[in-house]
Image (cartoon, rainbow, N blue to C red):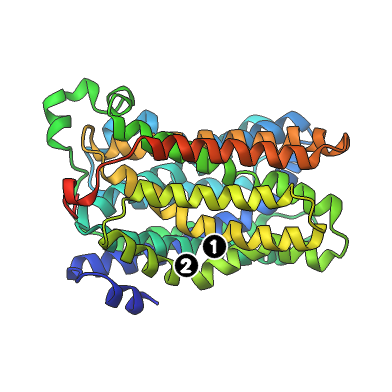
Amino acid sequence: MADVLERSSPAMTTGGTLLRYTIGADYLASGFARFSLVPVLAIMLTRNSGGASWVTGVGLFGFLVCAGLGMLPVSRLASRLPYVVTLPGGMLCSAVCAGLFGYVHGAWLTLGLLFGTGFGISVHTTLCRVLIVQRVQNEQSRNNIYCMQQIMTNAAGALGPFIAGVLYINGDGRPLLMFVSGGYLLAAVALVVGLPKNLTPPKTRAAKLAGPGRVAGPGRLLRDPEGRRACLATMGGAFAYGQFYSAFALLVALAVGPVLVRGALLAGPPLMIAVLQACVTIAVNRRLRAGATPLGVMIAGMVLFGAAIALLGAGLPMLIGSIVAMVIWSFAEMVFVPMVSLSFNRITSVSRVAASNVQGVAWTAGEGVGSLCGGAIFLLCYRHGAASAYWLALAAVTFAVALTCARSRPCTLSQRGRTP
């Protein structure tokens, strides 16, 4: 697969190829760790806290926030340290916290270890994005690495629930948590072996001129028109993406009968992405070389999200509508998700670390609000017989965001140059 991607894009340096394999191994190991834990995390939280329901709710929400935004408080410190310290350090933090999780009881210790796991994930994810844009100069080559991340993450996401089912034995989470801890530790080892030893995150020339006090905040990025477009498109697409594991999962559970069909509908996107993402990336790279912008491709992904959502409210037979929507949804994710990083890669008004932080904020906000609406508002609409109205209203919102982004037309490659 990696060879196919390399042949489809401009030549990469030896360092870029090594980086691809390092990040591929890293994301596969850490993905198995994360997606083996998530399916049973609510049960573990309830058991570890002695049945306190508030701990489960706070824990799930806090883990999502820490995994998305935990890097923010330490951005300035992390930007001064070598990647070989911070990236494996993030995974080591997650490994230690996950390993201890099964041996503590009580609400606060449980939550502290869970949030520590999320914090390590955030440091790792944020700085990986910065490292890629620093080491790989060609846009299509970066997209190939984002494709690799997608494939590894979704392969782990497809198999993780089965691993959880095998290792979570009679309410004892310790075997599973040792597997999770080992996955994060293996990711840390891969990073130590494959990363350059003295490389630190860069600052753009604009960020250096701005001075240290203004580098990390989002204000400067949001004053940049391209930064605002990237944030709006990311939040809009992530909002639609967040519906799959909330509203769509509820719809499947409530309205689709056979258990095997339910499982296939929910497992379909990770499996399709693991198999087809490379082909989609090759096609997208051709469009980028022809002059398309990452934001333009993101808008196409949002339109696909909107089409999938609209099909669910179009009155089709439930099973047929759900299958077709799931397939379109999968292609929307394959198109949209890698372009989020490419869009933020083009922003040079702030440091790479600041741009990556804002990317995490925009994605976490969009996905979080989307999941909240999909879990609460959809269920309310479904119980009152207005599920179709929910899907059609959601599709309208998605199309409206895509139209707003399209009307603010970004610069073309001929204006900016092919390599940011």
Q: State the CA–CA distance, disc 1 to disc 2.
A: 10 Å
Q: Is residue 66 visible?
A: no
Give the residue displayed 17% in from the left and 46% down from the top: 415
Q: Which of the numbered marks, if any, corresponds to residue 215?
A: none
Vertical relation: 155 (above or below) 70:
below
N-terminal of the two: label 1 or label 2? 1
Vertical relation: 86 (above or below) 257:
above
Q: Is residue 35 visible?
A: yes
Q: Which residue type carries mark 1?
A: Asn
Q: Which image quarter is the N terminus in?
A: bottom left
Vertical relation: 298 (above or below) 57:
below
Q: How many marks?
A: 2
Q: Which of the numbered marks, if any, corresponds to residue 154?
A: 1
Residue 231 is situated, as x and y percent measured from the top left of the image, at 40, 35
Nearer-the-camera pick, 277 or 102: 277
Give the residue displayed 38% in from the left and 31% down from the top: 72
Q: Which residue is mark 2?
A: 277
Nearer-the-camera pick, 173 or 77: 77
Left or right of 126 on screen, residue 131 = left
Nearer-the-camera pick, 370 or 36: 370
Q: Residues within 10 Å of mark 2 (few under 14, many from 20)?
A: many
Q: Which residue type carries mark 2?
A: Gln
Give the residue displayed 38% in from the left and 28% down from the top: 73
Q: Quadrant of residue 46?
A: top right
